[in-house]
Image (cartoon, rainbow, N blue to C red):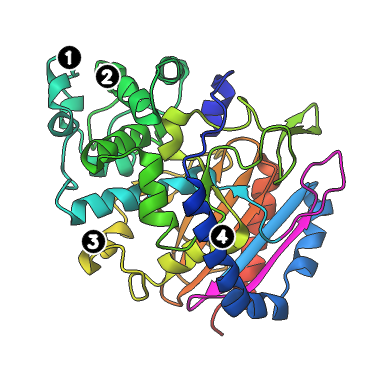
Amino acid sequence: MLKLLQLIYKTTQEDDFMNSFKRLLLTVISALTICLVAGPSVAQNPLDSTLKPYLSKYDLPALGAAVVKNGKIIAAGVVGTRRADANIPLTINDRFPLGSNTKAMTALLSAMMVDEGKLRWNSTVAEVFPELTDKMDSRLKTVTLEQLLSHTSGLPGDNEALTKIYMNGMMQGGNPDDMRYSLVVELVQKPLAAAPGAKFEYANIGYSLAGAMVERVGGKTWEELMVDRIFIPLKLATAGLGTQSSLGKTDAPLGHAVINGKLKPMLAGPNSDIPVVVSPAGSAHMSMLDFARWAGWNAADGKRGPALLKPQTMKKYHSMIVSMPAPKNPVPGTPPGGSYGLGWGQIQHDWAPYPLLYHGGSNTMNLSHIWVDVKQDLAIVITTNRGDKNAEEALRSLAKELYGRYKAK
């Protein structure tokens, strides 16, 4: 995702797909949940004092983290400022971008379609878009949903050619699904970079294509499905899609570009987040508490509601599919090695007794990490509004500290 934003110069403004009733309903539910469940636990275990030293050590404008155990948020905190050139303290409900941590949500939507018989893991691009087969590259015809979600489709990583396809899609009229379909029409005519299933290649475009497949069988835009099928059932009241802040306002932590060693706050606008056509790869945002709720649902591995997937599908959803070679200098927010499944990676660190589910996400101006230990029903989420190697080092160091503190002794 980070490389993509380095290639793109203009994107559309933030789209708001929640209608007012749903947003109001979610806000009320979230407020009650915070008061009755999360509030007391968070108050008893503040993380602010733990987080503050990281701000100066790594030159971070803001930092947030939360720990969830057995479905309860046992610690959370946010420190710093919403923008580096002003002192605007954060609140616990401030929204942070999740970047590629959105991929696990797109994979969850795909799994729901599998449960409902609308898709199979081996459903091919040609099957879902039969009207395009005459123009479709012969190898791309055979690419499956599972290969798209596991980055084994043969599609390349972000490059200039794909950037042109993204931008052509953004120039189309209609709703986001119309834009994504135009992207599909152009993409399927291009040859693959590798044979399907031959190797791992982190490809955001694969998630755009998977999102379009979900839209085709789901009968709604990916954005509507995200809200209806994930945000509402999991009571993620602050969750949204697109830029986390409002146009002309600093009502959320702004992302920061690093220019000549200095932090530049990025206001909401066409350059502050990814294009709508590639949203299934990384456009979700939410508060630390809601990010923790999402992590906690995954940490239960299907043992705690809501039951969004059948048990066997949940097992598949968290299973690994392909080994990832460790890159020499992984870009912040991209897989650092280990193995990869359906929107989830798995890596082993010396501070954990066994491999943990993990994913990172960045749009070059923000960074988020999620760590899930299903054996202990424990998860850690961390975010900051800086997206470079400083941020990556800070989040990994903090993850080690928090896991050491809250894991079972």
| Amino acid type indicated by mark 1 | Lys
- Number of other residues with Cα within 10 Å of mark 2, as a class: few under 14, some 14 to 19, many 20 or more: some
Label 1 vs label 3: CA separation?
33 Å
Circle 2 sits in a helix, a strand or a loop, which is it?
A: helix
Residue segment shown in magenta: 68-91
Question: Which residue is denoted by mark 3 in the rendering?
Answer: 313
Q: Specify the label residue 135 is tagged with.
A: 1
CB under 8 Å between callouts 1 and 2? yes
Residue 79 in the image: x percent, y percent? 77, 58
- Answer left or right for 335 relative to 117: right
Q: Which residue is mark 2?
A: 185
Indicate which disc, 1 or 3, sits on the residue closer to the N terminus: 1
- Element type where label 1 sits in the image: helix
Identity of the amino acid at label 4?
Thr
**Looking at the picture, how far across and down is residue 11, in whole percent?**
55, 23
Tell me the mark number nearer the camera, choosing from 1 and 4.
4
Q: Earlier in the sequence, mark 3 or mark 2?
A: 2
Q: CA distance from mark 1 to mark 4?
A: 46 Å
